[in-house]
Image: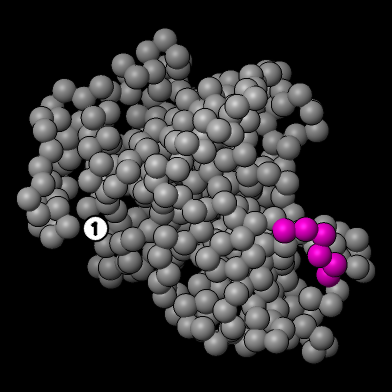
């Protein structure tokens, strides 16, 4: 950390702290993620190595940039570009939702980021407002969307070949697919597509689409809107020991997306949601298909200036909603938000990815 001057604390969480720092040599402002545990901690080693590997292979304008990785005094550090806000903060400023043109721009940028990951056979597995960083647009009035960047790849995985299973407990509950809630370990890119739909709906409403208080409540809320589980999902529900003795009421008459957004969303926006918020994972559109969706057609033209409404008590409104989930993710931006700590990626040897600062080796050159 010798070449960085700490300017402030961005946030703090289970894994460590994110510091706003200034590079003493270049005066560049960066975000430095400092891990609490030493690099001998197996969970920290594997999670950090996974994130470094992913970000090395995923350099793209809508994905946060990792500038440097190093260790000092047995502590691990990741240095990221500094991004001023995240989408949760934008939503807190506008609890009634954003104008459709801003929704379109943000969702388009998110879809581009996810498409880039999926082209590299990588699933993010933890898409949520806290992990969507926003550099505000030059227009201070908020007439255009800021520059969105997907961050926190600690849970990201390269999809295995064949029938190999993957860890099932991923993503924050409100953005989790039915199959994940049911304990499925053979899932794919569809889990990220579902999350895109949840984010879009939250941008429209200003509040989470499926704010479940438990896994069973989450499944109930999803079915109330979208209809019953598929037969395969129902069988998984009946076999899952966590749900023994539980059953759902009749879900054959759901509210439906059409009724929920009647008169509020145009046909192309509603169809976009229908394309990703599908109970059957195999029916969800791919990221490449979404990029060709009619909803994004106006993106090619200059965006129409729109002004989102604001609210003085917006932070209180969203804080109450998120408090129901027991969400302890106040650290935000580049810091991982962990509901559990799990080993995941193979440890390919940290020495090849981290340079001890002050050793004469430039850590950024290794990335």
| Residue 18 image offset from top left, x and y in percent | 67, 62
**Residue 143 sits in quarter:** top right
User: Which residue is depicted at the point 65% across and 57% down?
Assistant: 11
First to last magenta residue range: 4-9
Would you say residue 332 is visible in this rendering? yes
Helix, strand or loop: magenta stretch: strand
| Residue 285 image offset from top left, x and y in percent | 37, 39
Q: Quadrant of the N terminus?
A: bottom right
Q: Nearer the viewer, residue 53 or 80?
A: 80
| Residue 363 image offset from top left, x and y in percent | 74, 78
Q: Is residue 48 above or below residue 351?
A: above
Q: Residue furthest top?
A: 263
User: Which residue is depicted at the point 57% across and 79% down?
Assistant: 37
Residue position for label 1: 183
Image label count: 1
**Residue 36 sits in quarter:** bottom right
Q: Is residue 228 above or below residue 178?
A: above
Would you say residue 92 is visible in this rendering? no
User: Which residue is depicted at the point 91% across and 64% down?
Assistant: 26
Q: Is residue 115 above or below residue 40?
A: above
Q: Is residue 36 above or below residue 154?
A: below
């Amino acid at each position: 950390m010798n070449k960085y001057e700490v300017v402030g604390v961005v946030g703090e969480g289970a894994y460590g702290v994110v510091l706003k720092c200034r590079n003493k040599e270049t005066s560049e402002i960066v975000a430095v993620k400092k891990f609490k545990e030493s690099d001998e901690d197996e969970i920290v080693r594997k999670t950090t190595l996974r994130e470094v590997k992913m970000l090395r292979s995923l350099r793209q304008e809508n994905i946060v940039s990792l500038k440097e990785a190093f260790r000092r005094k047995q502590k691990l550090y990741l240095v990221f570009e500094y991004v001023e806000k995240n989408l949760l903060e934008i939503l807190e400023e506008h609890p009634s939702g954003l104008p459709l043109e801003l929704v379109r721009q943000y969702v388009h940028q998110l879809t581009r980021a996810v498409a880039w990951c999926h082209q590299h056979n990588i699933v993010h597995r933890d898409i949520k407002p806290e992990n969507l960083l926003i550099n505000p647009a030059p227009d201070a009035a908020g007439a255009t969307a800021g520059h969105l960047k997907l961050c926190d790849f600690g849970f990201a995985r390269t999809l295995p070949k064949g029938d190999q299973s993957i860890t099932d407990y991923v993503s924050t509950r409100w953005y989790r697919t039915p199959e994940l809630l049911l304990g499925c370990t053979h899932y794919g890119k569809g889990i990220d597509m579902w999350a895109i739909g949840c984010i879009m709906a939250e941008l429209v409403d200003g509040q989470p689409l499926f704010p479940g208080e438990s896994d069973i409540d989450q499944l109930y809320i999803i079915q109330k809107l979208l209809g019953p589980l598929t037969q395969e999902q129902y069988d998984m529900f009946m076999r899952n020991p966590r749900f023994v003795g539980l059953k759902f009421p009749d879900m054959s008459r759901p509210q439906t997306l059409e009724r929920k957004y009647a008169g509020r969303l145009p046909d192309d926006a509603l169809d976009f949601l229908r394309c990703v918020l599908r109970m059957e994972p195999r029916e969800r559109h791919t990221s490449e298909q979404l990029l060709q969706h009619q909803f994004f057609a106006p993106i090619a033209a200059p965006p129409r200036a729109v002004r989102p409404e604001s609210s003085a008590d917006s932070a209180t409104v969203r804080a109450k909603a998120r408090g129901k989930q027991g969400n302890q993710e106040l650290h935000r931006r580049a810091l991982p938000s962990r509901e559990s700590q799990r080993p995941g990626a193979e440890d390919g040897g940290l020495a090849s990815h981290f340079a001890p600062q002050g050793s004469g080796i430039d850590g950024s050159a290794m990335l």
